[in-house]
Image: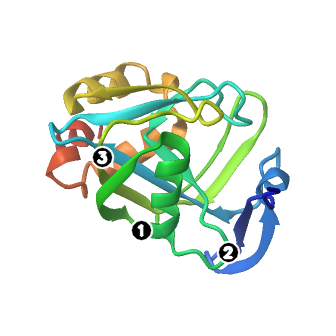
Amino acid sequence: MTHSPERVILLDDDGNPCGVARKDDVHHESTPLHLAFSCHVHDDEGRLLLTRRALSKRAWPGTWTNAFCGHPGPFEAIPDAVHRRAHDELGLEIADLQLELADFRYRATDASGVVENEICPVYTARAVGEPVLNPVEAMDARWVTPVDLAAALTAAPWAFSPWLVLQAQQLSATAGAILATAWRSVA
């Protein structure tokens, strides 16, 4: 079975959809603004799931980050895309999906010169079961306490994806009880 290439939604400066492009063609040294999402996953014990990006990833390979990120496809509702990526990247079912930061926007350049330029709504969810990593997406995963994550983000922000660091700062004021301890310590 042949799969069509993944496509992303291009956005104008005001965040309005203005086109579609192949994901492989979008991420480079002058990445256009596009729509993405990010999800922070916790378990029933209140621990947070961190993943380490696969070394084959174009941007930030080998970097620790939040549970997973992705791009909704054209005409795909973002919550549906979040559930799809949880399954595709982590073999994980999620529940209690909540939008935490509707307007998170960032631009960052990794060491190779690849730019991320996204409007990226940020969600939280509860894991149902344990992750089974797709090695193309993630090479490692760890459940960490909010206090330990806050300490690591404060001590070594360079060891994490820039979007995780920025989201942690913004989530400190808005996140629910599960994440509040971690994010308030980072702000």
User: What is the number of the mark on residue 127?
Assistant: 3
Label 2 amino acid? Pro
Q: How much space separates mark 3 and mark 2, taking CA atoms? A: 26 Å
Vertical placement of 122 versus 142: above or below?
A: below
Q: In this view, does 109 lie to the left or right of 154?
A: right
Q: Which mark is residue 60?
A: none
Three-letter code for the amino acid on which mark 3 is drawn:
Ala
Circle 2 sits on which residue? 74
Rate crowding at label 2 as few (under 14), some (14 to 19) or many (20 or more) other CA atoms within 10 Å. Answer: some
Quadrant (top left/top right/bottom left/bottom right) for the N terminus: bottom right
Location of residue 114 (image quadrant): top right
Residue 71: x and y, percent? 61, 59
Residue at position x 18%, y 46% from top? 178
Circle number at residue 102: 1
Q: Which of 4 and 122 is in front in this view?
A: 4
Q: Which residue is drawn at 34% across and 36% down?
A: 130
Percent of width and height locating residue 13: 67, 72
Q: In this view, does 145 lie to the left or right of 51?
A: left
Could you tell me which secondary element the residue under label 2 belongs to?
loop
